[in-house]
Amino acid sequence: MTKVDATEEISEDYRTIAVVGVSASPEKASYKVAQCLIERGYQVYLVNPTESEIMGRKSYPDLASIPEPVSVVDIFRRPDQVVPVVDEAIAIGAKAVWLQPGAANEAAAARAKAAGLLVVMDRCICNAPGRLTEEPEGGARGRGNGDDR
């Protein structure tokens, strides 16, 4: 099977995702997207330096603190805060970065691509083609816009 784009490759080949900038508030898109990924069977690590626990799971202060390799770094940050997260993703050996709507940053995307990472920008990870879109029973969907991280 030929993969159409990075979204399909990510959804089919990678199962470990770190959600950076996840909120502890169930009303926020970042919370809903993390919940969606968990419900769909992905190994999800939550990254928020201001929270110790979200959804009953440990929240890590940064990507380097996660105890196992991460394939995809899903980013919910303002565009001006994305480059350091991408640099961290490169440093930990991630295979892809996913810049959620509202987090688009061309310089960060170029850095990631130059380092050999797959890049998706301005698309919600829970609305991507492939296994990511398989809706669980009673599944949650975030709106995915950057205004309600």
Image (spheres, grey):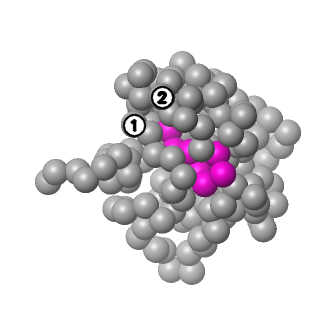
Q: Is residue 43 left or right of residue 12?
A: right
**Comparing labels 2 and 1, the label whose residue is closer to the camera:** 2
Above or below 115: residue 7: below
Residue at mark 1:
118
Task: Identify the residue at horizontal 79%, vertical 47% (top origin).
Answer: 53
The picture places residue 26, in percent across and down from the top left corner, at 77, 65
Task: Identify the residue at horizontal 44%, vertical 39% (top origin).
Answer: 119
Contact check, label 2 and label 1, Cβ < 8 Å: no
Start and end of the magenta stretch?
97-103
The picture places residue 47, in percent across and down from the top left corner, at 69, 40
The picture places residue 45, in percent across and down from the top left corner, at 61, 43
The amino acid on which the numbered mark 2 sits, given as a three-letter code, is: Ala
Residue at mark 2:
110
Task: Identify the residue at horizontal 14%, vertical 54% (top origin).
Answer: 1
Quarter of the image with the C terminus is bottom right
Q: Quadrant of residue 116?
A: top left
On the question of residue 135 being in view, the answer is: yes
The amino acid on which the numbered mark 1 sits, given as a three-letter code, is: Leu
